[in-house]
Image (tube, rainbow, N blue to C red):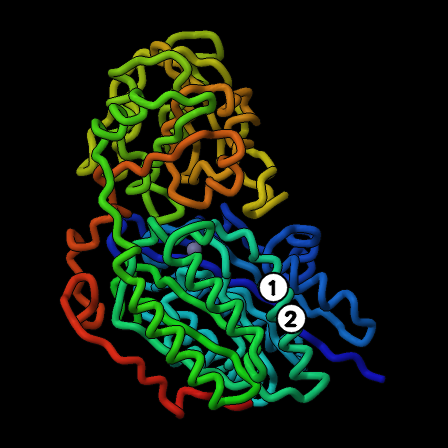
Amino acid sequence: MRKARIGIAFFYHESHSFSPMKTELEQFRNEGYFIGDEIFDAYHGTKTEVGGFLDVLNQHDDIEIVPLVCAAAVPSGVVSREAYAIIEEQMLRTIREAGRLDGLLLALHGAMVAEHLFDPEAHLLGKIRELIGQDVPIATTLDMHANLSEKMIEYTPLHFGFKTYPHVDMYEQGIHAAEALLKQLKEGAVFYAAFEKLPMILPSINMRTAEGPMQKMMEWAKQAEEEEGIYNVSVFGGFPYSDIPIAGASILVVALNPEKGRETARTMASRYWEVREEFLMDLPNVKEALDLALSMKADKPIALADISDNPLSCGSGDTTELLREMIELNLPDTLFGGLYDPVSIEKCRQAGVGNQVTLSLGGKISPEFGAPVVVDAKVMAISDGIFHNSGPFNQHLRVDLKGAAHIRVGFMDILLIGRPMSANDPEMFRHIGLEPGAKRILGLKAKNHFRAAFDPIISQVIYVDAPGVASNRLTHLSYRHIPRPIWPLDEMKYEPKTRGKAAWKQ
Ligand SMILES: [Zn+2]
């Protein structure tokens, strides 16, 4: 019996329309760019979407895995026309060269924007459909922050959004996508999609699934999945920094019973609209946040999350307002990082470990959010910046910071890193000899993902409203392309109206 040939691929980017940094091919190469068999080495045994695809497919003797292209970059500005074209072409070429495919598993983000495309994922799916035809099943995984479009649903009903934030179920959604694909392929299951796009863009600050409105949404989604005829319910928060006509939150129901799917999508959308106010939060500014931290008694560190410059929300990782205040306070047992500053790392290297050096820290990419801070620092350690995540978020994945330096300024420890990267895993600090769990106050370039690994070693998180490109204040962004009216920028009414034609049949 001939084996069924299933292609696997990964094209992942969250693109910030207001970021000054365009995302080039180099950023994909830095994070992960693998072709063909390299994919097995990079993702086998990882708790990623592709790790999930591999684990399901490997259980079947009658399936041949066809590894295509995996390209992921850290969230940043829009993907350059050239970088997108090169990766898309590589993807399409490997599909052409692979010959016949019986199915395709694609790990996508859903909030990618290219210089010339508002909806590059739909564009890619369209190109792939032209190559492999309409009948070959495709299943994707999508980030919870996907700005999902109706176009994507037209190419396949099988999309599986992450149900956790911090995203610690990438692997599980990879498994779900692969299982649904096989159900269609082997059992002839017919899936329908019911899709409801809501006129709202939500800040992600209060989207964690451990508490708050998104926890409620995910609980309702799981309850709905227990019902007859419902296969999967995804709740997408959307990504509010993509200035595109398809920006916004949405509900996608994958159903075996189309009418039931539409009804569930409508109900879920109404509930989403009802809890919308709970997503908005007022945050303390830098001084207020530090005062608050100093007033707290805690037996474990207090983390100040510099959310407006979180690299995983496309921050440059080098804004300085929180850093400057912490340096001025000069408290013992404080740690700040990782600050993106390859120039200062190079100066540390030249000065040598144990020596003093004058540095101009940060403020180079986005000086409008704070000028560089000039300091006399002692070089404590230098590293190549390579470590493996130990916490639940992207567990075991190799991270390459492109160099790192531990410096001490007064009483304060600072970690400099060679490319923008959120402080999501304590190994970022431990690999160079810093123990974040032993500090009193941590200033972290992070937002919510870090809590998967840091919550056990910290006592409190204070989200700080410092200036930055990923600020919680959406009203300060000069949108040009999002649909209007849209909540919370505009006051408006909304009725769910999932249409029959949105349901899609293989
Ligand atoms: Zn996300």
Q: Quadrant of ligand 1?
A: bottom left
* Mark pair 2, 1: CA separation: 6 Å
Residue 423: mark? none
Residue 90 shows in the view: no
Is the residue 250 above or below the residue 331 in the image?
A: below
| Residue found farthest to the top | 355
Is residue 10 visible from the viewing direction of this image? yes
Above or below: residue 47 compared with residue 462: below
Q: Residue at point 55% right, 40% down?
A: 399
- Residue type at mark 1 is Gly
State the SS at label 2: helix
The residue under label 2 is 178
* Label 1 sits on residue: 174
Name the residue rendered at 27%, 34% in the picture.
319
Crowding near the residue tagged with mark 1, few <14, some 14–19, many ≥20 C-alpha atoms within 10 Å:
many
Where's residue 63, x and y in %?
76, 74
Near-viewer residue (86 or 127): 127
Say left or right for 209 vs 324: right
Quadrant position of the C terminus in the picture: bottom right
Q: Secondary structure at mark 1?
A: helix
Label 2: few (<14), some or many (≥20) within 10 Å? many
x, y percentage for residue 362?
30, 29
Task: Residue at 41%, 20% (x, y): give it.
Answer: 440
* Quadrant where the N terminus is found in the figure: bottom right
Q: Nearer the viewer, residue 330 or 397?
A: 330
